[in-house]
Image: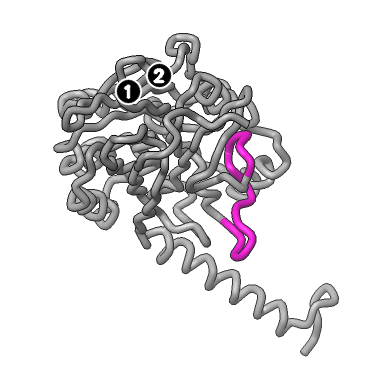
Amino acid sequence: MRARYGVPLGITAGIGATAAAGLVYAAGIEVRSFRLRRVTVPVLPEGMRPLRVLQVSDIHMVSGQNKKRRWLQSLAGLRPDFVINTGDNLSDTEGIPEALDALGPLMEFPGAYVFGSNDYYGPKLRNPAKYLMEKMQGRYGLNGNAPAVHAIHNPWEELRDGFDAAGWLNLTNTRGTLKIEGYEIGLTGLDDPHIKRDRYARVAGGPEATADFSMGIVHAPYLRSLDAFTADGYPLILAGHTHGGQLCVPFYGALVTNCDLDTERVKGLSKHESQGLTSYMHVSAGCGTNRYTPVRFACPPEASLLTLVPGPSKPARG
């Protein structure tokens, strides 16, 4: 068989067929293969009963995504103690009613939320290959992107009003508390560092002294936010944004994180150190994608059920 550019045509055809099969799998199968990540985190003070926290993130709802909507609704069957939504609920200006419908059963539980950039702004069509190369070269995302200027503005106020009406706490650069069966859970949140809306100075000072347990909440896990939460003594930080890398290499992992977090901590439970203190951090890989890049590979969509159990009462030093 004749070669093209020095490569036998049979090999070229095989590579093309493999790539096509991978694209079909990534766009047609894995992106809809929703999973639940279960994690145990030893962070509660001694004597507290375990707490079950459901984290949902990066839903990126597009009108018509019925399987995703039904799966999110089904998570209410887990009966969590409370729910944390770490942002990027939208990828469609028309998606708010379906996002609220998908989360409706979960809003029967106590909860809190922060927003991500895609809650505020609609996505843009970009060449995925160019985007990937930019991220791998570190050309964008190290300190966050400037606030969007010529972007489509989502009607995010409707999303906020729906969450607020259900009693979920809005943690946009502020603090709040949840009462969970006699316990007071302190929550400190930031607006999205990815578009430089975070204002840690407004919430600095560490956990509330009256809270039985406290955690930090942020959409994008930029190091400046993780450092601040950890240095202030928060034993646990929850974040999303990374999509777990979204397009990963089997047996290797993520190539990018879309922020300045290292790829080894792109999803799941890890630790973060700052100023001699150590916090646990959980990054959700999320359950959606930008509407213009509706693919996942070696990184299925997920929600996370975190079981918090007694452990060190304060972040460990060293």
**Residue 3 x/y as whole percent:** 81, 81
> Seen from this angle, which residue lies furthest right?
6
Q: What residue type is labelled 2?
A: Pro
Q: Please say whether residue 62 is one of the residues in the magenta stretch.
A: no
Q: Please say whether residue 257 is one of the residues in the magenta stretch.
A: yes
What residue lies at 60% left-to-right and 56% top-to-bottom?
A: 253
C-alpha gap between disc 2 and disc 1? 7 Å
| Among the two numbered marks 2 and 1 on one chain, the one whose residue lies closer to the N terminus | 1
**Residue 22 x/y as whole percent:** 54, 69
**Residue 46 x/y as whole percent:** 35, 35
Q: Say which mark, if any, is on residue 199.
A: none
Left-right relation of 211 to 23 = left
**Which residue is label 2 attached to?**
207
Q: How crowded is mark 2: few (under 14 residues within 10 Å), some or many (20 or more)?
A: many
Left-right relation of 249 to 83 = right
What residue lies at 32% left-to-right and 29% top-to-bottom?
A: 113
In the rendered image, which quarter is residue 80 located in?
A: top left
**Residue 32 x/y as whole percent:** 36, 60
Q: What stretch is highlighted in magenta?
A: 248-262
Q: Say which mark, if any, is on residue 186.
A: 1
CB of mark 2 within 8 Å of CB of mark 1?
A: yes
Front residue of this view, candidates 233 and 118 = 233
Quarter of the rendering occupied by the N terminus: bottom right
Front residue of this view, candidates 165 and 156 = 165
